[in-house]
Amino acid sequence: MSAGGPADGGGDGRGRDGRGRDGRGGDESGVKAALSGLTTRGRSFLAAGVAAAVCAYVLGQSDLLRVGLLLAVLPLVSVIVLYRTRHRVTGSRALAPTRVPAGSEARVRLRIDNVSRLATGLLMLQDHVPYVLGPRPRFVLDRVEAGGRREVAYRVRSDLRGTYPLGPLQLRLTDPFGMCELTRSFSAFDTLTVIPRTEPLPPVRLTGDASGYGEGRRRSLALAGDDDVIPRAYRYGDDLRRVHWRSTARHGELMVRREEQPQRARCTVLLDTRSIAYPGVGPDAPFEWAVSGAASVLLHILERGFAVRLLTDTGSSAPGEGLDGFAGSPQESADSAGLLMDTLAAVDHSEGEDLSRAHDVLRGGKEGLLVAFFGDLDEEQAAVAARMRQGSGAAVAFVLDGETWASGGASHGAVRDRIRRLREAGWCAVAVPPGASLPALWQQADQQQGEVFGGAVYGSKGGDGS
């Protein structure tokens, strides 16, 4: 929830605390701005009052002078009252949720508080939102009593992933007589993150570095004996139940067993973002399918305890990623998933033309499951992609052909040749037709993997697979 603070004296000036300035530092400029807010009615009353006063002076009519003063004073009093009131109106915005999948709605709630001792006149509220989220919301509020509060809400929705700013909130105040209108802006912003759509994937058998989990871990613990424990010197605060008495007798000082950290299964998801590899734009473009597919796989693998890493063709990873990627522990998986989704929400096409930088990163990495989403591959890039398989325990490639997506037909010969080349290098390569279902392709890759390699079950920690 973001607080806009008191409406500022002009523009959308930003204070250090995210609140609008009250504008009291420049009274002269503030008064001029207030006078410029006179409506046509207010200007007409002021002009009529001045004219009546001049005529009363010329004609010597005191009664006409009183009428002229009344007509001139009324809009000026409205300006002063409204000018003082606009310092005492606060606004805030609450966005829920702050992260939504593409095509889903988020709710924005606006709150206006009158903290002055005077009631306000008619209020017109407007929030600035990007046009991709829908029409700009506008609300008309009746007078707000002293100390009163008004709340309104609207919904935003986008079919395109990305990060979208909401704000600033603008408030237009009107006096009860319609003599003056003042527009003030709050400085606070909120950010709506629209993440890619994801699909739940079925558990499958894929070989990878699964040491530390499942059957492999239980076998290693069964074969390990007491002599395999590597002790260390006792430190203040260590649990005395971890004291290793045999080592204590041997070294002559108190020794404790180390906290063993089993090696976590790893998975790298490679996303090809080259602009030349994906034709077309929009929510149904092949690049958006690849981004959504990468998001689905990342969540699916992360939920199963793998340490996951997101890699693009530029060789860059997601911000905040550790040495072994994002942890998949129950305590950290939610935060890791959020960081990965935020990264994919903002990912865009790269200007690169090859996959060499991603290949260099994978060549120096540790073995594990590799899942790649490729766009168009020419013969040279297919060779680079084929060499990525050498450092991986298992590799699955989803290949999207732009020409096939544009025509809506079947894969042509060049694509089948690329698929065959990847399979010869050890990839489980699957061609992605337009509008394909990722869960179905995921199972197809599993069947292909089972025919060639068999594999260790990672679909469930019990080791039975499906």
Image (tube, helix red, strand yellow):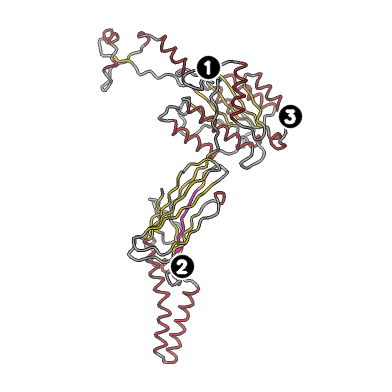
On the image, the x and y values in percent for residue 459 come to 51, 22
Q: Residues within 10 Å of mark 1 (few under 14, many from 20)?
A: many
Region in magenta: 165-172
| Amino acid type indicated by mark 1 | Ala
Comes first in the chain, label 1 or label 2: 2
Q: How far apart are labels 3 and 2 at the CA level?
A: 65 Å
**Mark 2 falls on what kind of element?**
strand
- Residue corresponding to mark 1: 456
The answer to whether residue 127 is above or below residue 220 is: below
- Find residue 412 and name its label: 3
Splitting the image into 4 quarters, where does residue 332 fall?
Answer: top left
| Amino acid type indicated by mark 3 | His
- Find residue 181 and name its label: 2
On the image, the x and y values in percent for residue 134 come to 55, 51
**Magenta stretch: dominant SS?**
strand
Instruction: Give the label, 1 or 3, closer to the camera.
Output: 1
| Amino acid type indicated by mark 2 | Glu
Let me know if residue 31 is in the magenta part: no
**Mark 1 falls on what kind of element?**
loop
Give whichever of 431, 37 is nearer the camera: 431
On the image, the x and y values in percent for residue 336 come to 46, 32
- Find residue 48 and name its label: none
**Residue located at (47% from left, 15% from top):** 215
Q: Residues within 10 Å of mark 3 (few under 14, many from 20)?
A: few
**Mark 3 falls on what kind of element?**
loop
